[in-house]
Image (cartoon, rainbow, N blue to C red):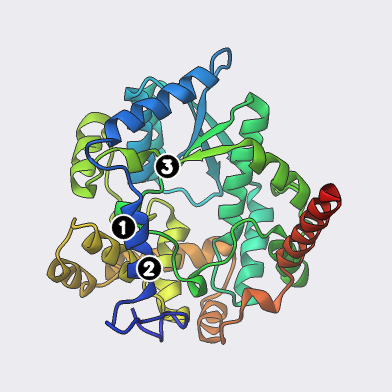
């Protein structure tokens, strides 16, 4: 990492960056090998107990990728009754669909799918292209979270199991690489400025409703309580669940593959492999030499890149000239548009005021 791809990078007097320190702090908080099994059992028993009388005791967002597939495997073997939640934005690869079907077949878990209206979602995606902001995936990530909210309300589920884990994903990506995923204000403002269609069916909640549901839900990073070696897990789910590899992190989605493998690199000079591989080095799952060797390989296989590029451009209704102009255009900040930050500031002011009045 350097200050070109991460302007917020901070090095200490020993040349160690803030991301390494963040990882070390998060890693130190993980359960020890001696206590992990007992803590895992205690946690799953609590989820099962609180889920009595309900059809499902927890939910899992599934994409067909490694983390969500293994999480479903772990949940099944722990005796949990999970509801699988998927948000279909029109970009699923056939491989992802097959992997999700295999998850359902192995676990016996039900699948709840939120299907986004393609024409409306395409219009929102094109708006983000025209806005020239870095987090083009923000609308989908937000819609996925709202899909989980909707499922939680519909089926009265309080626990959400997440595939996030420290040893393969670390902590947060650099701020300049992403945007606040619950920022519906940013999504609406960008779409209002550049979109052509009205936002009618796109799943979204008000700021107040988001806060209320967040207070109801308990997010559990269950994979932090089990031994998680990426290569061993891939071998396990391939054997047990007929899972098939898709060649990169989040590459089960065609648009995500093209966005991470090409758009981020070409337009924003960001290669997410730097972060992902660094985490695997820090957790001892790769040597630095192995990571550097993998990083030296192209982020995209040339033949797949051209195929995906033509597919994405055609599906979005762009010409190649329009796409090339987009890549060449200067990047803009999400904060060049309205954001939810103003609502957060008002919220915290109200909370402080309420506490003050309550005290008196």
**What element does badge 1 sit on?**
loop
Q: Quadrant of residue 344?
A: bottom right
Name the residue carrying label 3: 221
Q: Could you tell me how far apart the alpha carbons at marks 1 and 2 are, in whole angstroms?
A: 9 Å
Q: Contact (CB < 8 A) between labels 1 and 2?
A: yes
**What element does badge 2 sit on?**
helix
Name the residue carrying label 2: 261
Q: Nearer the viewer, residue 137 or 307?
A: 137
Apparent side of residue 185 relative to residue 259 in the rendered image (left or right): right
Image x and y of residue 272, in percent: 37, 68
Apparent side of residue 79 relative to residue 303 in the rendered image (left or right): right
Name the residue carrying label 1: 248
Image x and y of residue 220, in percent: 46, 39
Q: Quadrant of the N terminus?
A: bottom left
Q: Residue at x 76, y 67 (%)?
A: 342
Q: Earlier in the sequence, mark 3 or mark 1?
A: 3
Residue 348 appears in the figure: yes
Q: Earlier in the sequence, mark 3 or mark 2?
A: 3
Q: Could you tell me how far apart the alpha carbons at marks 3 and 2 are, in whole angstroms?
A: 27 Å
Observer-side mark, 3 or 2, equals: 3
Q: Contact (CB < 8 A) between labels 3 and 2?
A: no
Q: Nearer the viewer, residue 17 or 301?
A: 17
Q: Quadrant of residue 325?
A: bottom right
Q: Residue at x 37, y 56 (%)?
A: 26
**What element does badge 3 sit on?**
loop
Image x and y of residue 243, in percent: 28, 38
Observer-side mark, 3 or 1, equals: 3
Q: Earlier in the sequence, mark 1 or mark 2?
A: 1
Q: Could you tell me how far apart the alpha carbons at marks 3 and 1 are, in whole angstroms?
A: 22 Å
Q: Residue at x 81, y 56 (%)?
A: 350
């Amino acid at each position: 990492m350097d200050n070109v791809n991460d302007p917020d990078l901070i090095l200490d007097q020993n040349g160690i960056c803030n991301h390494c320190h963040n990882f070390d702090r998060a890693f130190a908080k993980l359960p020890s090998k001696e206590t992990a099994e007992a803590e895992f059992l205690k946690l799953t028993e609590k989820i099962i107990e609180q889920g009595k009388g309900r059809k499902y005791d927890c939910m899992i967002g599934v994409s067909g990728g490694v983390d969500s597939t293994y999480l479903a495997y772990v949940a099944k073997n722990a005796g949990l009754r999970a509801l699988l939640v998927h948000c279909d934005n029109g970009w699923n690869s056939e491989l992802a669909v097959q992997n999700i079907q295999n998850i359902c077949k192995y676990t016996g878990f039900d699948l709840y799918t939120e299907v986004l209206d393609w024409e409306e979602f395409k219009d929102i995606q094109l708006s983000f292209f025209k806005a020239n902001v870095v987090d083009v995936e923000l609308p989908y990530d937000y819609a996925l979270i709202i899909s989980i909210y909707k499922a939680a309300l519909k089926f009265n589920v309080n626990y959400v199991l997440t595939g996030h884990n420290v040893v393969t994903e670390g902590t947060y990506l650099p701020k300049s690489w992403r945007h606040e995923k619950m920022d519906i204000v940013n999504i609406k403002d960008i779409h209002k400025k550049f979109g052509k269609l009205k936002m009618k069916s796109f799943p979204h909640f008000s700021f107040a409703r988001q806060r209320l549901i967040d207070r109801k839900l308990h997010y559990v990073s269950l994979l932090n309580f089990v031994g998680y070696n990426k290569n061993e897990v891939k071998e396990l789910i391939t054997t047990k669940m007929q899972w098939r590899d898709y060649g990169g992190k989040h590459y089960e989605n065609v648009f995500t593959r093209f966005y991470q493998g090409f758009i981020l690199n070409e337009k924003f000079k960001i290669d997410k492999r730097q972060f992902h591989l660094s985490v695997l080095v820090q957790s001892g799952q790769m040597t630095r030499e192995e990571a550097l060797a993998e990083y030296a390989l192209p982020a995209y296989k040339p033949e797949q890149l051209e195929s995906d590029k033509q597919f994405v451009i055609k599906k979005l209704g762009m010409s190649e000239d329009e796409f090339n102009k987009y890549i060449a255009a200067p990047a803009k900040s999400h904060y060049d548009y309205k954001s939810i930050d103003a609502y957060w500031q008002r919220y915290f002011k109200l909370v402080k005021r309420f506490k003050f009045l309550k005290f008196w």
